[in-house]
Amino acid sequence: MEKVMIIKERLKTTQSRQKSDTNVRRRDLEFKEDDWVFLKVFPIKGIMRFGKKGKLSPRYVGPYRIIQKISQVAYKLELPPEMLLVPSVFYVSMLKKVVGDLSAIVPVETIEVSEEMLYE
């Protein structure tokens, strides 16, 4: 019984140490309505990629505007018409806040590369 008690105490100390480490690193993300966010895209097969695929595909697409806060961890986005099949409510871990000027963001589809590997 003594060994069992020692093992339980050691498990409690390691669990409390791990819990304190994760709480230090955790960031609570919170967005407001009309904020602009990027949407995380998974490059793994079998998971919805929002029309993006390939080894060098972008990790985030967007930016999209938040139109409604569903809960503390879920937000509804204003998606373009070509993404009608995608549900518009996303968990906060799938979103990344846009920092900077929105006019500087260029969609990947509009970039044309010439034969000399240059673009405007």
Image (cartoon, grey):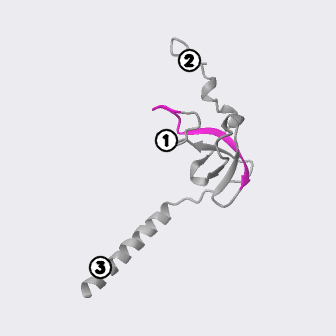
C-alpha separation, residue under disc 1 versus residue under disc 2: 30 Å
Q: In the image shown, does 91 or 105 lie closer to the viewer?
A: 91
Return the residue at label 3: 7
Return the residue at label 2: 113
Screen quadrant of the N terminus: bottom left
**Badge 1 or badge 3: first in the primary sequence:** 3
**Badge 3 or badge 2: first in the primary sequence:** 3
Residue drawn at 61 percent across, 26 percent down? 109
Region rendered in magenta: 53-69
Residue 66 drawn above or below residue 59: below
Q: Residue furthest bottom?
A: 1
Q: How far from the left and from the top, in percent, is residue 63?
A: 65, 39
Total tally of numbered discs in the picture: 3
Q: How far from the left and from the top, in percent, is residue 57?
A: 51, 33
- The amino acid pointed to by label 2 is Val
**Badge 1 or badge 2: first in the primary sequence:** 1
Which quadrant of the figure has residue 102? top right
Q: Residue furthest top?
A: 115
- The amino acid pointed to by label 3 is Ile
Which quadrant of the figure has residue 30? bottom right
C-alpha separation, residue under disc 3 versus residue under disc 2: 63 Å
Q: From the viewer's perspective, is the residue at label 1 or at label 3 nearer?
A: 1
Residue drawn at 52 percent across, 39 percent down? 59
| Label 1 SS | loop
- The amino acid pointed to by label 1 is Gly
Return the residue at label 1: 46
How many C-alpha atoms fall within 10 Å of the one at disc 3: few (<14), some, or many (≥20)? few
